[in-house]
Image (cartoon, helix red, strand yellow):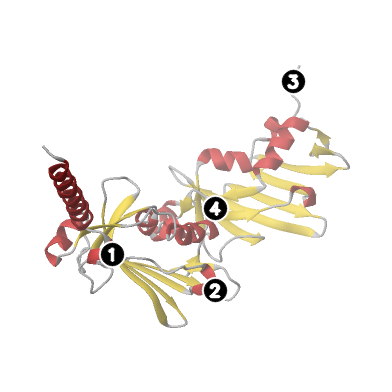
């Protein structure tokens, strides 16, 4: 085989390699060939309404004048809203997986079965998506734009965030307290009634000495009082007519928080009677051990008996 023949073989191999590489690029369904998908850069400042619809269920997140958000008319949790906007950015490049309407039902992105996500600002649509079934990874889902036949695999938390029910968006924080500003706590726990009061650098319980470590743990517990959820109408009907426990927190200028606790067979229902925090007439749900944490038995705050 002479040098001329070797050169011809080398050129032929180079052409074959170029053809093979081109066919690989085309067969991958690259966005540059069959479509493109990119979400606009969205921040809370750019949006005033987010609507998520699945069948007859809907979640409406609305920005309030103060910069806070509501969900279906109730106070929304700030961290939940933050996670939503973060979810728009935490993904690798979306992968095109289908481009025919025949695939919509299988991937859950048909207009009837998918979750509609609509984002608006000042009455104008900023973004519309149809979210479908979860993808091969837990943190992934299929999605498309309405009117577009291209279906993409989105890797990120967007689908799991959009799956939240209304209660998952609501703010469960009942109250947040600055411990240094607390002058006294009045606790009613059935027949166990006491006042834990600050006495200079120490604390007394009904005027007697306390266990400083136990008091410190208690004060740390009441810094942020959080509910497990919200009362259902059935739970409200089963609650006792009067509160079986009560907590009043006093500062230098009077009462800063009052909570009343009704018992049910499985949980406590918490009424925010007055003071900081709370959400209007909302009745919260707390577990027994959490209520024990904010209304402990008086003996747990006293020095251990020798």
* Label 1 – label 3 distance at C-alpha: 77 Å
List x then y, in percent, for residue 77.
52, 59
Q: Which residue is mark 2?
A: 64
Residue positioned 58% across, 55% down in the render? 174
Q: Which residue is mark 3?
A: 305
State which tag comes first along the sequence, 2 or 4. 2
In the image, residue 149 sits, relative to residue 91, either above or below, namely: below
State which tag comes first along the sequence, 1 or 3. 1
Report the mark closest to the observer, 1 or 3. Answer: 1
* Label 2 – label 3 distance at C-alpha: 54 Å
At numbered mark 1, what does the secondary structure look like: helix, strand or loop?
helix
At numbered mark 2, what does the secondary structure look like: helix, strand or loop?
loop
Kindly identify which numbered label has been placed on residue 270.
4
List x then y, in percent, for residue 67.
58, 71
Report the mark closest to the observer, 2 or 4. Answer: 2
State which tag comes first along the sequence, 2 or 3. 2
Q: How many marks?
A: 4
Q: For the residue carrying disc 4, how many other residues have a C-alpha within 10 Å: few (<14), some (14-19), or many (20+)?
A: many
Residue positioned 32% across, 51% down in the render? 140
């Amino acid at each position: 085989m002479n040098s001329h023949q070797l050169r011809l073989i080398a050129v032929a191999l180079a052409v074959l390699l170029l053809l093979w590489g081109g066919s690989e690029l085309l067969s991958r369904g690259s966005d540059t060939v069959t479509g493109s998908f990119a979400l606009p850069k969205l921040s809370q400042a750019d949006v005033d309404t987010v609507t998520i619809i699945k069948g007859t269920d809907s979640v409406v997140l609305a920005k309030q004048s103060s910069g806070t958000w509501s969900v279906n008319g109730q106070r929304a949790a700030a961290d939940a809203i933050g996670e939503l906007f973060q979810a728009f950015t935490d993904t690798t490049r979306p992968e095109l997986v289908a481009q025919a309407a025949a695939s919509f039902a299988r991937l859950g992105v048909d207009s009837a079965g998918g979750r509609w996500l609509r984002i608006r600002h000042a009455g104008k649509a900023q973004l519309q998506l149809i979210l479908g079934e979860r993808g091969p990874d837990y943190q992934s889902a299929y999605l498309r734009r309405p009117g577009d036949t291209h279906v993409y695999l989105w890797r990120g938390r967007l689908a799991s965030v959009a799956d939240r029910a209304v209660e998952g968006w609501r703010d469960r924080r009942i109250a947040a307290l600055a411990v240094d500003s607390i002058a006294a706590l009045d606790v009613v726990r059935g027949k166990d009634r006491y006042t834990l009061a600050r006495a200079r650098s120490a604390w007394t319980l009904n005027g007697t000495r306390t266990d400083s470590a136990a008091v410190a743990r208690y004060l740390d517990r009441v810094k942020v009082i959080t509910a497990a959820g919200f009362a259902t109408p059935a739970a409200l009907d089963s609650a006792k007519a009067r509160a079986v426990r009560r907590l009043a927190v006093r500062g230098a200028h009077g009462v800063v928080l009052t909570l009343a606790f009704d018992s049910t067979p499985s949980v406590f229902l918490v009424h925010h009677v007055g003071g900081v925090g709370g959400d209007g007439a909302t009745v919260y749900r707390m577990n027994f051990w959490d209520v024990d944490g904010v209304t402990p038995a008086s003996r747990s705050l006293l020095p251990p008996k020798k």
